[in-house]
Image (cartoon, coloured by chain):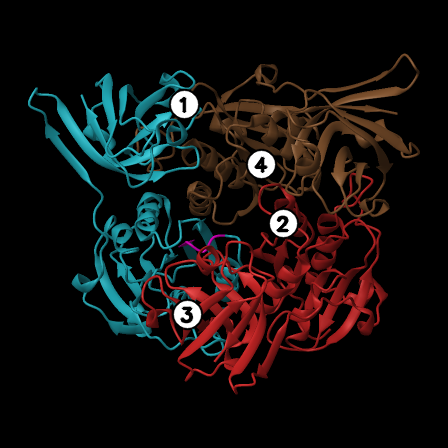
Chain colours: A red, B cyan, C brown
Amino acid sequence: MSAPAPDTVFFLSDYGLRDEFVGVVHAVLARLAPHARVIDLTHDIAPFDVRAGAGALVRVLPHLGPGVVLAVVDPGVGGGRRALALASGPGPGPRFFVGPDNGLLVPALESTGDVTKAVALAPAPVAGATVGPVTFDGRDVFAPAAAALCLGADPGSLGDPVVATSLVRVPAAVCEAGTLADGRHLLRAEITWVDRFGNGQLAAPAVEIPDHVAEVEVRLENSPPGVAGDLGAWRRVRSYTELAEGEPGVLGDGNGRLALVVRQGSAQLRFGVDAGGLVQLVW
Amino acid sequence: MSAPAPDTVFFLSDYGLRDEFVGVVHAVLARLAPHARVIDLTHDIAPFDVRAGAGALVRVLPHLGPGVVLAVVDPGVGGGRRALALASGPGPGPRFFVGPDNGLLVPALESTGDVTKAVALAPAPVAGATVGPVTFDGRDVFAPAAAALCLGADPGSLGDPVVATSLVRVPAAVCEAGTLADGRHLLRAEITWVDRFGNGQLAAPAVEIPDHVAEVEVRLENSPPGVAGDLGAWRRVRSYTELAEGEPGVLGDGNGRLALVVRQGSAQLRFGVDAGGLVQLVW
Amino acid sequence: MSAPAPDTVFFLSDYGLRDEFVGVVHAVLARLAPHARVIDLTHDIAPFDVRAGAGALVRVLPHLGPGVVLAVVDPGVGGGRRALALASGPGPGPRFFVGPDNGLLVPALESTGDVTKAVALAPAPVAGATVGPVTFDGRDVFAPAAAALCLGADPGSLGDPVVATSLVRVPAAVCEAGTLADGRHLLRAEITWVDRFGNGQLAAPAVEIPDHVAEVEVRLENSPPGVAGDLGAWRRVRSYTELAEGEPGVLGDGNGRLALVVRQGSAQLRFGVDAGGLVQLVW
C-alpha cells in the first residue's frame, strides 16, 4: 500500500461499560499496536442490535479521519458467521473496517465508497491471546486484525478473500414518500434512533420536507397502548430555537435527517417516540 | 502568545455515553489537532443541568494541568445563546475555556483568575464538518475551536470580542451562616452534588464548621413526603474512618466542602439527601 | 531497575462514570506523568465490591502488556487500611500494582507471579494535590504513586516496606468437586460474575466438566422466592453456536471458566443467575 498505515482505531460495540470487555480490547490494541490511538465511538449499542450499530456508524463516518473502524455487535458471536476485514476506496475517512459479517459494517463503508477488498479473518487467534476454549472475538480476533492493519498489513494477508456480493446486509429502514388522494404529501419513515435527550431520528433525509413547509401532521403507526397515535400538527423548524420550551417540532438534525424533537424536553417520554416505530408525516 | 500551545483538552458534557456524541467530538479533535490528548472529565451531567456542570468544573479545576476546557451543557443548543472561547490569566491550570454562554464556564475560570479575553465564536462551522441544516455545536463549533487553540490560535482570531461583564452567570448556590437566638450557630446551605456513593456535598466550605465541633443537628428543608426533615444529631468528623459502618456524619470532603455522608452507605438513599435541596446545620 | 519504566496505566475502580472521579484521576496522571497512556479497564465495579474488582483484574491480566495496574475499590477509603504499591516478578504483563490493602490487588498479581516488593504508600499527598481536609485517595495518593512508577521510581522509594504475608486477602470463591453416592459427579461453585449480557461465570475452570459430557443438571442453591432452584438438564457446549436461540447451556467461556449462558438471551433474567449465588452441577 502506498498510503501510510492507519494510526487510529474507531471502536464501537454493544459491550457496555459495566464489564471489562472494552478495557481488554483497548489493552490488546495497545500491546499489539502501541502507536495507535483508540477512539471510542460508543459501547452502549443495545445488546445484539446490529441495525442500531450500523446506523451509528453511518452517522459518525463523515466526521472520522483516516483509520480502522473496529465494530462489534454480534448475536452470532463464537461461530456461525464470518469475521471480516474490509477495505474501501480512497477517501478522507477510514479505509478499513473490521467486525462480524452480519450487516454491521457495510452501510457505513458504502456511504463513502465501495468495498475494494474483503477477507474472512482466519479463525486462528493470535498466539497467547486466548485463555479459554471459546474465543472472545473482540479481544482475540477483531482487535488483533485491527492492530495488524495499523502495523501496515494488507487486509489480504489476514484471511481468505470474500466476494463482496456475499456480505450479509441488514434490511434498509423504511422511508417511503407519496401523495394522498387530497394532494397532500405523505412521508412514512422508520424511527431509527432515539438519543439520550429523547429526540427521534427518522430514516428520512431532511430535504424530504422542504424548509418552507410550516406544519406537518405527525402520526405514530401501531402506537403502544396508552399512547395516542395522532400527535397533531407539529411545526417544521430549522432550529431548536424556533420552538418554545416544551414545544414539539419536526427538525432537520445534525445528521441531515428529519427528527421528532421537543425543545428542552423528550419526544420519547412525551409522545412515545421509540426506535423501530413507524411515523407518518403529512403536509 | 509566548506560552506554548496547549496539548490537552479537558472535555465535560451532558451528552451521556449511550449515543455517539462524545465519540464524534473525540474524532473531530483527533482529526483537527492530532497531537492533542483528550481527557474526559465526565459526560453524565444531567441533561441541560448547567449548574451541575459548572459545579463539576469548579471541583476538578485545581487538579488540571495546562490545556483547554471544552464543556457543553446546553439547553440553548442550536441558537439563542452565544458560543464562547474564553482565556484566563496565567496559572498552572487550563488557560482556555470553550463552550456555551450560559454560565457553565465562568465559575471554574474565575476560581483561578479573571477573564482576560472573551470572544463569541463565529457561527460559520469548519468546512466539511456539518452535514445537516442544524449544527451539532459540540462537533461543529466547540471542538473545532478547541482544536484551533491547541494549534496555537489566539482566541481573538476565532470570533468577535465579548465584554466580560456581559457573560451569562448562573445564580450562586445558597450558603448562609448566622446565629440563632439561643446563641447556637446556623448554617443554611444548598446540596449542590450527590455523587455515585450517595454523599451529599454542600455549597459550604468545610471551615464553616470547625473541626472541634463534636455534633451538628441536621435538618432538610422541604423534605419530600415520607422523608423526615429532622435528621437528628450527626457527628462532625474529619474522616470516614471516625464513623462506624452505616453511621451518618458531617465531613469536610476531598473538595474542601462540607458533605453529608454515611460510611459505606448512601446519605441519598437513607435520608433523601438530593441535589438542589437545602440543609440547615445547627451547632 | 534495568527494565524500562512503564508507560501504561491500567485503571479499574468503582467510581462509576456519573461523577468526575475518573476524569480527575486521568488529569492527575497526565499532569504528573505526561508520557503515560491510561487504559480504563472498567469503572463500574459495584460500589465497595472488592471481590468483584479483584475478579475482574484476574480476568484481564493475561491480556495486559507491561505497565502499572491502578485499582481502587475501597470501602475503607480515607483511612483504616494501608495504601499499597506492589511489584511482581518479571513477566510479559504489568509488574506494578497500586491500590488499597483490602484484597483487591493480590489475586491478579499472584496469577502471574509472586509479590517481590510491597510498600505502604506514605500518607503525605503530593504537594498541591489536595484541597480538602480529607484526601480523595485515588486522586491524591494512588494516582501520584502510579505516576511516580511511570517516571521510573522504585516502589521502595514510595513508602515503608510491608511484609507480603501481611497483605489482606479476600476469601476465595467456592469451588468444590466431588462424587455423589450414585457415582455421578457434583461440582458446587460460586457465581462470581454476571456480565452485561446476563451470562453467569462460575469460579470453576472449564476443564472441571470435560467437553465430552453431553448434559449437566443445574441447580441454584438458595434461589430467591419465585425462582426455581432446579433449572433442569442443560447441554454442555463448547460454543454458543451449538445452542439454539434462547437455549440455555453450560459453556467454557473466554476466560477459561464455566459459565451459565443462554444463546442471545440472559441467564440472569431467565433463571435468576446472580453474582454471589451458588450453583450445583451434576453429571
Q: Are the residues at dot 2 and dot 4 in contact (C-beta closer than 8 Å)?
A: no
Picture disc at residue A249: 3
- Which residues, given as a range, are shown in magenta? B12-16
As helix, strand or loop, the secondary structure at mark 4 comes to strand
Labels 4, 3: one chain: no
Reading the image, the residue beneath label 4 is C69
Q: For the point 66% across and 52% down, which residue is it?
A: A29
Three-letter code, disc 1: Arg
Tell me the CA gap for discs 2 and 4. Answer: 14 Å
Q: How crowded is mark 2: few (under 14 residues within 10 Å), some or many (20 or more)?
A: many
Q: Please, which chain is the residue tagged with disc 4 on?
A: C
Q: Is residue A152 left or right of residue C160?
A: right
Measured in 3D between alpha carbons, the distance from the residue under mark 1 to the one under mark 3, in whole angstroms, is 47 Å
Front one among C85 and C170? C170
Secondary-structure class at tag 2: helix
The chain letter under disc 2 is: A
**Amino acid found under the numbered disc labelled 3:** Gly
Give the letter of the chain under mark 3. Answer: A
Q: What residue type is labelled 4?
A: Val
Residue behind mark 1: B263
In this rendering, would A240 be left or right of A136? left
Residue A26 marker: 2
Residue C214 located left or right of residue B40:
right
Label 3 or label 2, whichever comes before in sequence order = 2
Of circles 1 and 4, the one toward us is 1
- Residue drawn at x 59%, y 28% is C105
How crowded pointer 3 is (Cα within 10 Å; few <14, some 14-19, many 20+) is rated as many
Q: Vertical placement of C230 versus A226: above or below?
A: above
Question: Which element is circle 1 on?
Answer: loop
Question: In front: mark 4 or mark 3?
Answer: 3
**Residue A115 among magenta residues:** no
State the mark number for residue A151.
none
